[in-house]
Amino acid sequence: MSSDPGGRPRHGDGASPRRYASKKEVVEMAQGSVKWFNDAKGYGFISQEDGE
């Protein structure tokens, strides 16, 4: 199998693409006010309205 300098298979070399099983995710959005947020890292914490 041929690969590029990064070690990844090149398209068209006969290698079949990897297939991953999909999984379902359930996400519940929290409601509250921002307690702390780091703009540089893009994440933070909230104080939830329901106290959790």
Image (tube, helix red, strand yellow):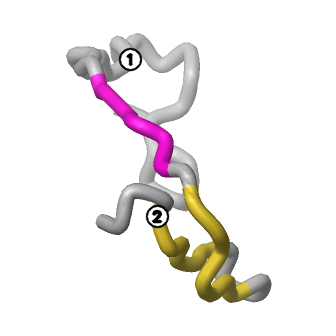
Mark 2 against mark 1, which lies toward the viewer?
2
Task: Find residue 44 and name its label.
Answer: none
- Assign the C terminus to one quadrant of the image: bottom left
| Residue under label 2 | 48
> Which region of the structure is painted magenta?
25-30
At label 1, counting other C-alpha atoms closer than 10 Å, the crowd grade (few under 14, some 14-19, many 20 or more) is few
Which x, y percent locates residue 38? 69, 87
Q: Are marks 2 and 1 in contact (CB under 8 Å)?
A: no
Left or right position of 21 against 44: left
Left or right position of 7 against 41: left
Asked whether 11 or 19 is in front, the reply is: 19
* Quarter of image, res 39: bottom right
Q: Amino acid at mark 1?
A: Pro
35 over 26 or under it: above or below: below
Mark 2 or 1, nearer chain start: 1
* Quarter of image, res 24: top left
Magenta stretch: dominant secondary structure: loop
At label 2, counting other C-alpha atoms closer than 10 Å, the crowd grade (few under 14, some 14-19, many 20 or more) is few
Which x, y percent locates residue 43? 60, 74
Q: For the residue labelled by badge 1, is the local secondary structure a helix, a strand or a loop?
A: loop
Residue lying at the far right in this picture: please name it.
39
| Residue under label 1 | 17
Residue lying at the far front in this picture: please name it.
50
Label 2 – label 1 distance at C-alpha? 43 Å
Q: Residue at x 62, y 87 (%)?
A: 36
Q: Residue at x 60, y 83 (%)?
A: 35
Tag count:
2
